[in-house]
Amino acid sequence: MLLRLCKKTRKLRTHIAEAAETTLRKAQMRTLFPGPFACTANQGMLFIAPVSVLLFFIDGLGIGTRGSHNPFDSLEGAAPLAVFQDELAEIPYDGVLAPTDACLGIEGRPQSASGQTTILTGINAPASIGYHKQGFPNQALLDIIREHSIFLQLKRAGVDDITFANTYTQRFFESRPRWISATTAAVEAGGLRFNTVSDLQAGRAVYQDFTNAMLVERGETVDLRSPEEAGEVLANIVAAHRFTLYEYFITDKIGHAQDHEAARRVLPMLATFIRSLLAMLDLKHTTVILTSDHGNIEDLSVRNHTLHQVPTLVWGEHRERLAARIRSLTDITPGIVDVLTRGTKTDGQSGQADSARASF
């Protein structure tokens, strides 16, 4: 009798401690991110954001072949980014790979403006304008984004707690560039506010160089972050929102520069950032989609973009079914909208994707 009472007491203390920790985390999230976010009760415990999605965009990442031209070949610590053609991919944290078409039925090498427009809208942008558009969106692409931005689609569907996690410096607002990126146009189309350096300092934003080294070089008063620290910050942002977009484009710059040394230095850091992020997320309630607009860094023998498929990696409860529907860049936004509005059946209730899964 006494033994059973002791066991019940220990169990009660455990529940109280877990509930207190969860309540504290919720309070911390509300301090960092004022405003409503989704919650659900389960056996008296409170969980934050039961259904959320992170779209992690990496510029210029394709599925290449092995060889000296590919900086991923024999590179330690590069999972989950090291994916090779005709090889079974081992994706950490039970992720799924969906090789994804970036050419979209249009001749020529895929380019950034049209590829990113496609990812962020679900509209085949190269087919709409008749070619692959490099650099920044032209008026035709801006028109597509302003009508079909993923942020706007989610708002129209009643999903309001959404954010672009990246940081903008004051220079952007003081001397706005003539040409803006597809992501900037998508954020504006959705009527979202831009994160500033003060948001980054408060732990509410991440810079595209997640270490903040570039910001320090430009004279901004910010602390350097390790990949692990940046992963924790982004994980907190994701936990506080229904949909989060994060963009990283140093990979494309390295690819155009054909800089092997920079690639082998930066890629393990990027991979560590991603693994740290995944380790801190509740993947039972969060879906993570990592994708790219075109290939580049996987073949440093050329300065141009490649014709390779890009890796779309999916983690979380909906990974199998979501990966199974992704064949081209046009499938990214519809899949995200579906998860956040109608939901997707859990694993084991769909056919196998053209993908591979492995435990970390």
Image: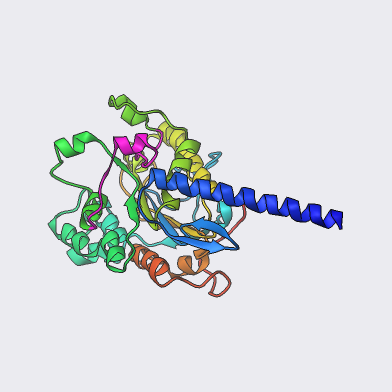
Which of the two residues, 319 or 198, is positioned nearer the viewer here? 198
Query: Horizontal and vertical percent for residue 239?
Result: 45, 52
Q: Is residue 312 above or below residue 272?
A: below
Q: Is residue 59 above or below residue 334?
A: above
Image quarter for residue 196?
top left
Is residue 204 shown in magenta?
yes
The reply to whether residue 24 is in sight is: yes
Q: Is residue 61 left or right of residue 186?
A: right
The reply to whether residue 355 is in sight is: no
Q: Residue at 37% across / 29% down in the picture?
A: 213
Which quarter of the figure is the N terminus placed in?
bottom right
How did the renderer colour the structure? rainbow
Q: In this picture, which residue range is highlighted in magenta?
A: 190-211
Q: Residue at 35% across / 62% down in the picture?
A: 329
Query: Horizontal and vertical percent for residue 27?
Result: 46, 47
Most frequent secondary structure within the magenta stretch: loop
Q: Residue at 58% across / 60% down in the picture?
A: 44
Query: Horizontal and vertical percent for residue 198?
Result: 30, 35
> What is the number of callouts on the image?
0
Q: Is residue 124 left or right of residue 234?
A: left
Image quarter for residue 148?
bottom left
Q: Is residue 269 left or right of residue 7?
A: left
Q: Residue at 55% across / 53% down in the picture?
A: 91
Q: Is residue 39 above or below residue 20?
A: below
Query: Horizontal and vertical percent for residue 88?
Result: 57, 57
Q: Is residue 116 left or right of residue 354?
A: left
